Image: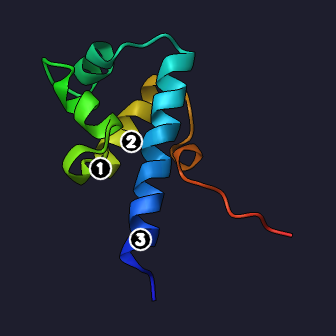
């Protein structure tokens, strides 16, 4: 059974990956918010700090992947397959 802690870690890992990729591309929180259809960077800031357990949904990740020229799966932690 998947635990709540595992889910929270997954969401945190995804948020951190988006943040890393955003910064790598010199995209501000405001620019990312605009890409996602918001007028204020507050939404992205709330997600990046995980305030109130905020996280990106699959639609957000799809939009970001297209904007960043990435595959959707790249935002998800990869299991080591040996």
Closer to the chain start, of discs 2 and 3, is: 3
Label 2 vs label 3: CA separation? 21 Å
Determine whether, in the image, residue 5 is placed left or right of residue 24. Answer: left
Q: Quadrant of residue 51?
A: top left
Q: Which residue position is annotated with label 3? A: 5
Say which of marks 3 and 1 sits in front.
3
Q: Which residue position is annotated with label 2? A: 61
> Crowding near pointer 1: few (<14 within 10 Å), some, many (20+)?
few
Residue found 46% across the figure and 35% down from its top: 18
Closer to the chain start, of discs 3 and 1, is: 3
Coloration mode: rainbow
Instruction: Tell me the element at label 3.
Output: helix
Find residue 9 and report its horizontal and vertical position in percent. 46, 60
Find residue 38 and report its horizontal and vertical position in percent. 15, 24
Q: Quadrant of the N terminus?
A: bottom left
- Residue situated in front as seen by the camera: 46 or 56: 46
Q: Quadrant of the C terminus?
A: bottom right
> Crowding near pointer 2: few (<14 within 10 Å), some, many (20+)?
some
* Residue 68 visible within the image: no
Instruction: Tell me the element at label 2.
Output: helix
- Residue 57 is marked as 1
Determine whether, in the image, residue 46 is placed left or right of residue 72. Answer: left
Residue found 25% across the figure and 23% down from its top: 33
Determine whether, in the image, residue 56 is placed left or right of residue 9. Answer: left
- When the figure is inspected, residue 71 is found, relative to residue 13, above or below; the finding is above
> Crowding near pointer 3: few (<14 within 10 Å), some, many (20+)?
few
- When the figure is inspected, residue 79 is found, relative to residue 32, above or below; the finding is below
* Residue 76 visible within the image: yes
Q: Quadrant of residue 80?
A: bottom right
Pointer 2 with pointer 1, Cβ within 8 A: yes
Find residue 63 and report its horizontal and vertical position in percent. 36, 34
Find residue 5 and report its horizontal and vertical position in percent. 41, 71
């Amino acid at each position: 059974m998947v635990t709540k802690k595992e889910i929270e870690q997954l969401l945190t890992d995804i948020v951190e990956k988006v943040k890393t990729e955003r910064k790598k591309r010199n995209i501000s929180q405001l620019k990312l918010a605009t890409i996602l259809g918001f007028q204020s960077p507050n939404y992205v800031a709330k997600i990046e700090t995980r305030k109130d357990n905020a996280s990106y949904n699959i639609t957000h990740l799809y939009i970001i992947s297209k904007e960043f020229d990435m595959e959707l799966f790249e935002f998800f932690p990869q299991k080591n397959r040996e």
